Amino acid sequence: MKSAILAFVAGVFLLQLQAALWTWPGVVLAVLGAVACLGWVQSIRRKNLPFMSKSLMAILRLSAYGVLGFCWANLMAMRALQTELPAQWELRDVDVVGVVDSLPFRSEQGHSFQFAVEKYVPIEPGVDEKTMRDFPHRLALSWFNSSAESAQMGEVKPGQRWSLRVRLKRAHGNANRDGFDYELYWLEQGVRATGTVRKETRLIDDFAWSISAMIERSRFVLRDRIERALPDAPYVGVLTALVVGDQRAISQEDWKIFNRTGIGHLISISGLHITMIAGLFAGLIHYLWRHAFFTRLPFCLWLPAPKAAVLAGALGALLYVALAGFGIPAQRTLWMLSVVAVAMWTGRVSDAVRVLCLALGLVVVLDPWAVLSPGFYLSFAAVAVLMYVGYELAPTLQIKGDGSAPLTAWRRVWERWKAPLLVAARAQYAVTVGLVPLSFLLFSQLSLVSPIANAIAIPLISFVVTPLALLGSVLPLSLAQWVLVLAHACLTGLAHLLTWLSTSALAIWSAPQPTWWMFALAVLGCAYLLAPRGFPMRWLGALCCLPVLLNTTPTPVFGRMTVTAFDVGQGSSVLIETAHHRLLYDTGPGISLDANSGTRILLPYFQARGIQELDMLMISHADSDHSGGAQSVLGQMRVKALSSSLPADHPLVMSAAQTQRCVAGQHWEWDGVRFEVLHPVPEIYLSTKWKTNALSCTLKVSAGAHTLLLAGDIEATQEDELVNSIAPQLAATVLLAPHHGSGTSSTTPFLQAVQPQMAIFQVGYLNRFHHPKTEVLQRYLDFGIKPLRTDTSGAITLQFGDVVAVSHYREMHPRYWYPH
């Protein structure tokens, strides 16, 4: 059974790598073939026929289970994709009636939440409700404070039934290497369209009862109680995450500290917390059941106390997992506890590996997309490592003396706690070593201080902070405040210690994502390193990890360069890499330190590539769609120099170690690649009449016979000045379209002077500016210039060599949930 489950999971994983789904006939034929194969193999085994070896039968059997897993995931994906917003209905207003179906996220900009649609109401003449029958039944909506009806918004709560006028578009996210895949996330959530609330809003019912609404409203109430008890507390978001699993209020700066110290797995409702709650429920009911709830009723005759305790523990775990929003680690623990509960209830003994495999199978059956979540692998791998090294059961504790004198009180305490502390230390060592390959594969880094941090954080968070937070969330507010203040004080002390640990240069070991053979070799090495005592030369396992630990970032050869135009939505960010240097031109849009392209796109990319330093960050101008992620990049990476057109008192300039203004005439050479600043001229800084767009740093980069021109947001006036002053210097192979292809740029004389073969348009999907303008795009096509668009292609990578080779992220990593 265990091998069958693993084969099924492998089939599910294989489906998630496909560019397209199988059709119904193909799925039905595959299922029938797999079932027939299993029946045939089973009949051969029963008859013990000699013409087929056991190994061949095992291969056929596992292949059949893999096909069943593939087909199951295919069917789930077909079901999730069956509703779609028609393209002609994008950016059109429509009235919807439905229920707030998730825990809303509140920010300075407004609310965001998921909305279960009950009815679409057409507002355009000639459109009936039948036309909208196959529209998405679940939406991800944003209700901004600037909306026309924001005064009516008040507090959006789960379970409320609203009538809203919304403007929708298909679910679409940025597509970059190692960036968060919002399209996959929305598919898993059942969301097939996103939108904004426009106007004509009306609250129909404050609570529309359903089990889901009741759970989400309970989570909302608990979160609200914590926030009211601790207004403006710096770590209230962490307490909220421990109680209801909502991590969205935790700042990026705090996440940086938690990840560098390796305790990020604790900042949620983890498996340890769920097991603790289940144990408390089970212990309480066991005690009360044995004592008949202090009555004379024969409870134990009706049901044995151990079975009652098991049932109570399982129900307690289910309740807590529901509060967690059914996250992957929480699901894993719930299913494992459920399997154990069933085994104990029915009197059957089940080994630990079988329990883990059953939990694995249940998670994948219920959520086939879980196999794409890092938490899925970390969660199951950590338990598997503990089982492998034999720490799933603590040893029996014994208090020893020498027989000649009684033990002192302190000695007795030490002898009582020595064994469990030793087991905990060995388990932490095993998990740290065992997860090294996964840590580099998923995060490209390993926290070296995590054993120390976890040794302190695990008992403090699991046995002090979490129980206090849970207790404080349900007590009357007058009492809850004292309990929550104590929990927050403990958390604050821990945060100070973690901050000190994370500031060390040796806190983490970073390396690029390993190749498949590096990862496989490291897995074998860690398995041998953790092998039982008696295995010869276990230290050789550490040598197998060296390729992962010493992996280096690939770079272009001398005289060539690699250019990456990130998909940052409506904004701009371009990375230029030479043999030994890197320049980042702009950092994309951002609305806050926690919500910007730097934290969501650039930093994850740099981390996955093992890039820890930038030789130069060039911010073309001050507009937020170009500088929005700069503060995050400056705060979390080493940046040798900042070049920009920003004023001297700008926060970015003041926070950089070394700064300079970009001025026409500046030039330098890195590794055989020449960089030249063409604009702005020095005199433009002396005038106050120019908008920020006119100050855009315009950079020309030449590698051999090919040239890249980055024009920022210059407009027609600046283009005319460049054409009339330095027209011969404008010629380029690739042009970053000025101002994203707006109607105020890309004039005919400018394109004639540049004469590019390709033009990159960094634009957002169906952006409100309608960039690139239709007439501007046609102008490029009329000149025979090939347009490259990040909204349709995702991140675009160009290799400048003898020719310019172009690759598109969505083409290189096709997935069935991407738009076709």
Image (cartoon, helix red, strand yellow):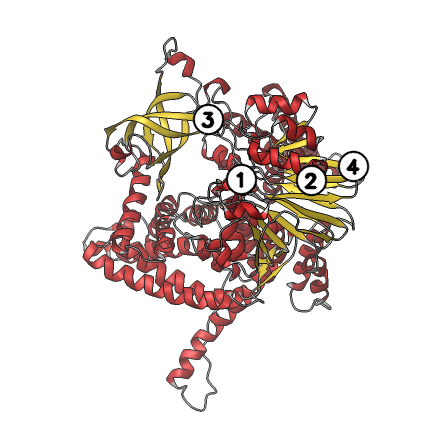
Q: Quadrant of residue 487?
A: bottom left
The C terminus: image quadrant: top right
Residue pointed to by mark 1 = 694
**Amino acid type shown at disc 3:** Lys
Is 729 on the left-hand or right-hand side of 810?
right
The residue shown at (73%, 48%) is 674
Residue pointed to by mark 2 = 708
The Cα atoms of the two marked residues, 2 and 3, are separated by 34 Å
Q: Which mark is residue 169?
A: 3
**Amino acid type shown at disc 1:** Ala
The Cα atoms of the two marked residues, 2 and 4, are separated by 13 Å
Neighbour tally class for label 3: few under 14, some 14-19, many 20 plus, Cα within 10 Å: many
- Residue 61 visible in the current orientation: no
Is 408 on the left-hand or right-hand side of 358?
left
Of residues 393 and 317, the one drawn nearer to the viewer in this rendering: 317
For discs 4 and 1, the disc positioned in front in the rendered view: 1
